[in-house]
């Protein structure tokens, strides 16, 4: 059973994702801001991280970059989930080290599929 | 002879009673005018409407101008926050007004600034020469930093910023303003819904003292501990937030705060930018805009929003507060004198006939009445010219009525914005509402009286004092009206 | 009346007023707290139901048809629908309809309570059934401005061409803010074409302006001829110019050039509004036709924003460049090696 960390300041979205991923058999940890997310990543060592971009205190991009620069966490797959949909945003997202980029509004089953794929790729 | 004097005293005492009764009634009326606007805007969350503005292709682009003088403490956080404001198209123009500290270096390092050729207009004549222009290396970061020679005038830095700005709307803020993330969307709405008429929009400025601010965002809003600060919160609610919303509905806005204001760039250029000699450049520019628009016979509007968009640190000691209020009074006197042709002049509509006379009588000259009136009432009582009941009536008109108006402002706040969550905050603010009228108000009148005296003496000494304290270019405590 | 009596009266009146205000404030605060807690409690049971419906379960939603449950259900559902798309969203929408929640909301759009109407309308917009258009069209004439605005927004999401006429009427009547109508028409998209073309000829200049912008944003080539006509109309020419720029067809070039030349002539007053000139120059730049070059050159000497627009338009065809790249080139030895081709000035596309 994989552990997925979900970081988003929108409580409704977190509830939605938690429901969907738990239904698919994952253990879900939820955090509502960037700093909390980073701390949770360090302490929980999730198998995948689902990150919102625009959050207070630390943006998703900054969390992603921090994860990638930490050798112990760098191998954890990161999926960005954000309302920012411009080409330039997508480029910046991947440049920060994301493995996948999902735009809000999103399809819950698609999200679940992508999370599964990214977990499988990382051999988790 | 002494009978004549006593009679005169008696008449003056009646006048004092009338003054307080009228002043508080006007405030009450303005609050009542503001109430529907305030209540209506918060019946449901505003997010959907703001989202519409975000995707609307007609939403105009905004240049955010931030004048900065020795702001190394907060400049990076403020710039980041300005860049992160939720809005489809912006640019941020930081004007480094000859800072002698690390302001520019911090910006250069954080945003990877690269020097470019200074392509700056000169539509507004400016005093301080421009030294260099820098942009962020990352094309996705719309940041421009201008370095100019300091001329000890915030208005000059603003004008350079406006000259550099390339969008049709300009938003002028302070380097230490804490903005709501949706501030620009709120401010843009009047421009989008009424593009032919709206020329300037001000937002509600509120006090952030005592609250927890995190990297340019407010995490939790709390009432501060000091009474000086608490009283200002009530004052800001009543006099600035609600009164200005009321005046906005009446078409009588004469100030848009320098802490946050959005203007049409072409109109700002048309009035020659901000006046560098004015101590109250934020009021000065709005009155100048009124004058110009009337002269051009344009149908126009200046809007003051009820929505809180900007939080600012208010003075936490009486000494700093006194200096601030003296300056405001002085600045107001300057503006009223400069535009004296407009006062009471029906050619200028409600501004000339309602707003400016109100500010002249009740804001500028009011302190005279309050101080002298207090003495006159006591004197009259002592000399038996007026009865104890009459004196008590004056007390009621001045104090109790005043507390009622302040409490009314608090009630409106509670029914609408509810930004202060905890019960003890509400209790503290209620107590502050009482203290505002009994004690603070009299000191305030005294400070404002001194501002008026300074104005009569001439501006030079005031600028001198400001410069000595390093405040002329915009110090850490906002010296302009909220 | 003696002074003492007046004083007494005044004191009593003001004190009563003061006490009443304080009590009202405390009451307002308490009431809000109570309502919020009630909502949270109900939402805890409602949310799982809706999440299961999202997953395709045929849950029983009858408790969400009436009363408080309906209100909470609609608010939670509206939020949920706003966040998702795809199959799950479709299943949720269908289930909400089959459980009668859409019909209940359409009825509540005429409810006595403005708050209830508002929540019902937002819900209908989120679910997005074209059949709800009639109910929402009626709501455009609601007494409360916030309800009218919500109705306009919701109409944009229903995907029915019959929404265009009521939206245009509401705009003409000044009943709804421009931004709400503009975005609603944009969301309707190309299916609104017929109604939009009619509206381009509307007697109200505000309607013509908004419609022009929307036609441009939607890329409706059939609007080209009417838009050209609107360029001559002072009250909506700026919008027409912007729209023609977005459509990008060279047919517009001669007229746009001619009107810009007229604006640049010395006869123009100093205080005149440059917004049309800038919009037209930007439009010409987008179209990218060489015939416009003399116009750009004569615009360079004008006010700053006009000159900026002209210099942007003059740059060779390709991505619009920011001041960044050209300025760097002009600076000897300055920041060489930075490839700063920026396709979006100030981070936005037009």
Image: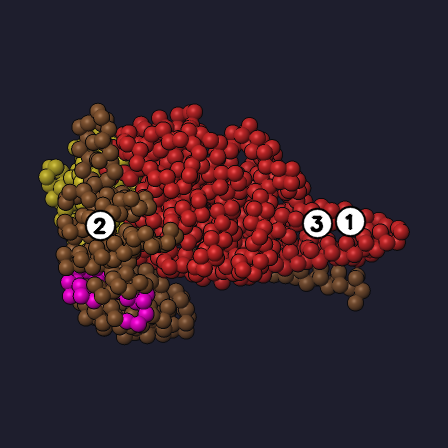
Chain colours: A yellow, B red, C brown
- Please, which chain is the residue tagged with disc 1 on? B
- Residue under pointer 3: B369
Residue B214 vs residue C162: left or right?
right
Tell me residue B344's x, y (percent): 60, 57
Q: Main secondary structure of the magenta part?
A: helix
- Residue under pointer 2: C295
- Give me the residue at 36% from left, 28% from top: B131
- Residue under pointer 1: B376
Q: Where is C169 relative to C228, above or below?
A: below
Q: Is residue B320 visible?
A: yes
Q: Is residue B183 visible?
A: no
Q: CA distance from mark 2 to mark 1?
A: 72 Å
As helix, strand or loop, the secondary structure at mark 1 comes to: helix
Q: Kindly report which numbered mark, 2 or 3, lies closer to the viewer in this rendering.
A: 2
Residue C338 vs residue B19: left or right?
left
Q: CA distance from mark 2 to mark 3?
A: 63 Å
Q: Which region shows up in magenta?
A: C202-226
Q: Residues within 10 Å of mark 1 (few under 14, many from 20)?
A: some
Q: Pointers 2 and 3 in contact (CB under 8 A)?
A: no
Q: Where is C91 relative to B207, above or below?
A: below
Which of the two labelled residues, at mark 1 and mark 3, occupies the earlier sequence position?
3
Q: CA distance from mark 1 to mark 3?
A: 10 Å
Whether callout 1 and callout 3 share a subunit is answered yes
As helix, strand or loop, the secondary structure at mark 2 comes to: helix
Tell me residue B56's x, y (percent): 28, 56
As helix, strand or loop, the secondary structure at mark 3 comes to: helix
- Give me the residue at 75% from left, 61% from top: C8
């Amino acid at each position: 059973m994989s552990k997925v960390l979900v970081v988003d300041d929108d409580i409704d979205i977190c509830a939605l994702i938690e429901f969907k991923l738990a239904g698919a058999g994952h253990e879900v940890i939820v955090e509502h801001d960037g700093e909390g997310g980073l701390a949770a990543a360090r302490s929980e060592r999730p198998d995948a991280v689902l990150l919102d971009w625009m959050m207070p205190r630390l943006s998703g991009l900054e969390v992603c970059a921090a994860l990638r620069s930490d050798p112990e966490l760098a191998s954890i797959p990161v999926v960005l989930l954000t309302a920012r949909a411009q080409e330039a945003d997508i480029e910046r997202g991947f440049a920060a080290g994301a493995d996948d980029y999902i735009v809000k509004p999103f399809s819950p089953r698609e999200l679940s599929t992508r999370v599964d794929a990214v977990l499988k790729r990382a051999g988790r | 002879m002494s009978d004549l004097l006593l009679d005169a005293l008696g008449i003056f005492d009646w006048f004092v009673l009338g003054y307080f009764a009228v002043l508080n009634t006007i405030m009450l009326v303005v609050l009542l005018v503001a109430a529907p606007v305030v209540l209506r805007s918060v019946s449901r969350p505003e997010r959907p409407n703001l989202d519409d503005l975000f995707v609307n292709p007609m939403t105009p682009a905004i240049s955010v101008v931030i004048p900065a003088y020795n702001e190394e403490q907060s400049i990076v956080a403020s710039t980041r926050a300005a860049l992160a404001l939720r809005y489809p198209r912006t640019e941020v123009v930081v004007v480094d007004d000859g800072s002698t500290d690390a302001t520019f270096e911090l910006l250069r390092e954080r945003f990877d600034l690269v020097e470019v050729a200074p392509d700056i207009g000169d539509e507004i004549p400016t005093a301080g020469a421009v030294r260099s222009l820098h942009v962020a290396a990352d094309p996705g970061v719309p940041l421009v930093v201008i370095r100019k020679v300091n001329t000890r005038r915030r208005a000059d830095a603003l004008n350079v910023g406006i000259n550099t700005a390339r969008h049709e709307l300009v938003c002028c803020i302070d380097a230490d303003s804490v903005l709501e993330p949706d501030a620009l969307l709120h401010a843009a709405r009047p421009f989008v819904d009424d593009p032919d008429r709206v020329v300037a929009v001000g937002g509600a400025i509120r006090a952030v003292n005592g609250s927890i601010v995190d990297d340019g965002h407010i995490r939790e809003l709390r009432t501060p501990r000091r009474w000086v600060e608490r009283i200002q919160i009530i004052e800001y609610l009543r006099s600035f937030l609600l009164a200005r919303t009321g005046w906005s509905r009446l078409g009588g806005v004469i100030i848009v705060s320098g802490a946050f204001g959005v203007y049409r760039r072409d109109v700002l250029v048309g009035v020659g930018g901000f006046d560098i000699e004015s101590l109250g450049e934020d009021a000065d520019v709005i009155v100048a805009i009124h004058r110009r628009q009337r002269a051009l016979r344009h149908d126009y509007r200046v809007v003051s929003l009820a929505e809180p968009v900007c939080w600012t640190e208010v003075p936490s000691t009486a000494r700093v507060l006194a200096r601030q209020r003296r300056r405001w009074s002085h600045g107001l006197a300057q503006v009223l004198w400069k535009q004296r042709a407009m006062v009471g002049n029906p050619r200028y509509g409600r501004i000339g006939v309602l707003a400016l006379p109100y500010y002249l009588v009740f804001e500028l000259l009011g302190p005279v009445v309050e101080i002298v009136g207090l003495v006159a009432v006591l004197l009259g009582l002592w000399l038996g010219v007026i009865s104890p009941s009459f004196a008590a009536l004056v007390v009621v008109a001045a104090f109790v009525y005043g507390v009622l108006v302040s409490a009314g402002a608090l009630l409106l706040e509670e029914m609408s914005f509810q930004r202060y969550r905890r019960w003890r905050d509400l209790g503290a603010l209620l107590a502050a509402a009482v203290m505002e009228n009994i004690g603070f108000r009299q000191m305030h009148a005294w400070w404002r009286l001194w501002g008026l005296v300074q104005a009569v003496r001439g501006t030079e000494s005031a600028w001198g004092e400001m410069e000595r304290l390093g405040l002329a270019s915009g110090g850490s405590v906002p010296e302009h009206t909220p | 009346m003696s002074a003492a009596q007046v004083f007494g009266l005044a004191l009593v009146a003001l004190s009563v007023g003061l006490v009443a205000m304080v009590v009202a404030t405390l009451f307002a605060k308490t009431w809000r707290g109570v309502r919020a807690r009630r909502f949270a409690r109900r939402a805890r049971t409602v949310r799982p139901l809706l999440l299961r419906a999202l997953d395709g379960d045929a849950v029983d939603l009858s408790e969400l048809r009436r009363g408080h449950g309906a209100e909470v259900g609609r608010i939670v559902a509206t939020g949920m629908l706003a966040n998702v798309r795809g199959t799950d969203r479709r299943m949720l929408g269908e289930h909400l309809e089959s459980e009668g929640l859409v019909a209940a909301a359409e009825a509540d759009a005429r409810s006595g309570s403005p708050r209830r109407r508002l929540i019902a309308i937002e819900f209908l917009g989120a679910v997005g059934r074209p059949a709800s258009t009639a109910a929402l069209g009626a709501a455009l004439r609601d007494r409360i401005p916030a309800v009218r605005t919500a109705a306009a927004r919701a109409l944009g999401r229903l995907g029915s061409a019959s929404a265009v006429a009521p939206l245009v009427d509401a705009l003409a009547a000044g009943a709804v803010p421009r931004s709400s109508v503009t975005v609603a028409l944009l969301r309707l998209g190309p299916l609104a074409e017929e109604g939009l073309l009619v509206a381009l000829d509307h007697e109200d200049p505000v309607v013509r302006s908004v419609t022009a912008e929307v036609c441009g944003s939607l890329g409706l080539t059939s609007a080209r001829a009417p838009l050209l006509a609107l360029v001559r109309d002072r009250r909506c020419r700026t919008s027409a110019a912007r729209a023609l720029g977005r459509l990008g067809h060279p047919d517009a070039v001669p007229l746009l050039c001619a009107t810009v030349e007229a604006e640049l002539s010395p006869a123009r007053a100093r205080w005149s509004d440059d917004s049309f000139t800038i919009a037209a120059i930007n439009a010409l730049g987008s179209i990218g036709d060489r015939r416009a070059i003399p116009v750009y050159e004569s615009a360079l000497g004008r006010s700053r924003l006009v000159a900026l627009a002209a210099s942007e338009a003059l740059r060779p065809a390709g991505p619009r460049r920011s001041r960044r790249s050209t300025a760097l080139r002009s600076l000897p030895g300055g920041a060489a090696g930075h490839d700063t081709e920026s396709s979006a000035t100030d981070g936005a596309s037009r």
